[in-house]
Image (spheres, rainbow, N blue to C red):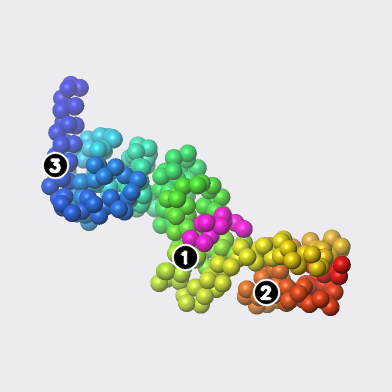
């Protein structure tokens, strides 16, 4: 009996692989390899994604499909993309979760991870959200990326809650592909949930690399308004502005003494205002690079050898040495 099952499995795998290889184009492996440099070029057949999707849609109706879904791991990149499409076409939510959980340990590149979607599971967003949170907490990079991509795909609409974005922001990794997915998430959030998402690039909720990548991707997006893009571009100077808060230039330090207001209650109120405003002077309505703490007005006053006194919001005091 087991020999018969093995034979059926082998024949099914051979059928799918041969069908995929038959769609390969001679020049396409090199092109694909440049897109996924982390994948061994020897495992790239060179098949266009739309052709794999079309084949998967047809094969999903084939009785052998269930056999193929248990045949892991695969050898070719395109077999994994094909497998991902088969999961996407699954209409039963329970079967979808069973299939994706079995598949995730074998996802090892962005092209496969970003193919996965969850149409069947999206009908019960609370269940899907719990699964996504589990995937984002995984110790596997591309399982985490799948979680971030699905959070972006299904929870930046009416199901959006700010705490979801915070969970994406809290992911800590040095991996380029995971952090690019996080930047993609926040760039999309800026297009769909501006008021909530913008605070993530204004404040310190994102690491600097992901924050700048988010701004760059958002500025390239046709879904973000020109007004919002201009504002985002102004935030690129955030790091320099932050240094002005804590590290006055050495030559200025030699000439003057900058201290916080001795009234701790005032300091507490102003710092809370800075936190809420994303680092802009809470005493001013406009948010421009000039009103980013330490504001331009006070920086100019620091340079004035005759000036002694508080900044506009009374957080800092300049005294003459």
- Viewer-side residue, 93 vs 83: 83
Residue named by callout 2: 291
* Residue 205 in the image, given as x and y percentages of width and height: 60, 56
* Residue 226 in the image, given as x and y percentages of width and height: 47, 77
Residue contact at pointers 2 and 3, CB within 8 angstroms: no
Quadrant in which residue 308 is drawn: bottom right
Residue 49 in sight in this render: no
User: Which contiguous range is marked in magenta?
Assistant: 204-213
Question: Which type of secondary structure does the marked residue at label 1 adopt?
Answer: helix
Residue named by callout 3: 18
- Residue 8, above or below 218: above
* Residue 281 in the image, given as x and y percentages of width and height: 70, 71
Label 1 and label 2: CA atoms lie apart by: 22 Å
Labels 1 and 2: the sequence-earlier one: 1
219 horizontally vs 61: left or right: right
Nearer mark to the viewer, of 2 and 3: 2
Task: State which quarter of the image contains the C terminus.
Answer: bottom right
Report crowding for label 2: few under 14, some 14 to 19, many 20 or more residues within 10 A (C-alpha).
many
179 horizontally vs 58: left or right: right
- Viewer-side residue, 168 vs 62: 168
Rendered residue at 56%/50% (across/down): 170
Labels 2 and 3: the sequence-earlier one: 3
Nearer mark to the viewer, of 3 and 1: 1
Question: Is 310 included in the stretch rendered in magenta?
Answer: no
Report crowding for label 3: few under 14, some 14 to 19, many 20 or more residues within 10 A (C-alpha).
few
């Amino acid at each position: 009996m087991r020999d018969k099952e093995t034979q059926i499995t082998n024949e099914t795998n051979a059928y799918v692989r041969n069908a995929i290889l038959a769609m390969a184009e001679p020049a396409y492996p090199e092109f694909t390899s440049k897109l996924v440099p982390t994948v061994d070029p020897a495992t790239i057949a060179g098949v266009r994604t739309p052709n794999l999707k079309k084949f998967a849609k047809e094969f999903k109706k084939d009785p052998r499909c269930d056999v193929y879904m248990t045949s892991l791991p695969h050898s070719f990149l395109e077999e994994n993309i094909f497998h991902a499409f088969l999961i996407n076409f699954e209409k039963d939510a329970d079967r979808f979760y069973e299939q994706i959980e079995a598949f995730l340990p074998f996802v090892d590149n962005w092209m496969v991870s970003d193919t996965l979607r969850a149409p069947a599971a999206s009908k019960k967003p609370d269940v899907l959200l719990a699964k996504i949170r589990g995937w984002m907490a995984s110790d596997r990079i591309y399982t985490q990326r799948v979680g971030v991509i699905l959070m972006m795909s299904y929870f930046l609409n009416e199901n959006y809650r700010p705490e979801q974005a915070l969970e994406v922001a809290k992911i800590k990794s040095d991996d380029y592909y995971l952090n690019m997915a996080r930047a993609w998430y926040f760039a999309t959030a800026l297009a769909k949930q501006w008021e909530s998402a913008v605070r993530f690039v204004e404040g310190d909720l994102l690491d600097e690399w992901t924050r700048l990548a988010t701004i760059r991707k958002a500025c390239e997006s046709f879904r973000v308004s020109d007004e919002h893009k201009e504002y985002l571009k102004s935030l690129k100077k955030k790091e320099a502005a932050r240094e002005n808060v804590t590290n006055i230039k050495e030559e200025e330090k030699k000439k003057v003494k900058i201290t916080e207001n001795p009234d701790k209650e005032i300091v507490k109120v102003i710092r809370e205002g800075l936190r809420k405003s994303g680092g802009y002077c809470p005493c001013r309505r406009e948010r421009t690079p000039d009103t980013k703490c330490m504001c331009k007005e006070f920086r100019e006053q620091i340079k004035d050898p005759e000036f002694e006194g508080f900044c506009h919001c009374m957080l800092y005091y300049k005294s003459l040495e």
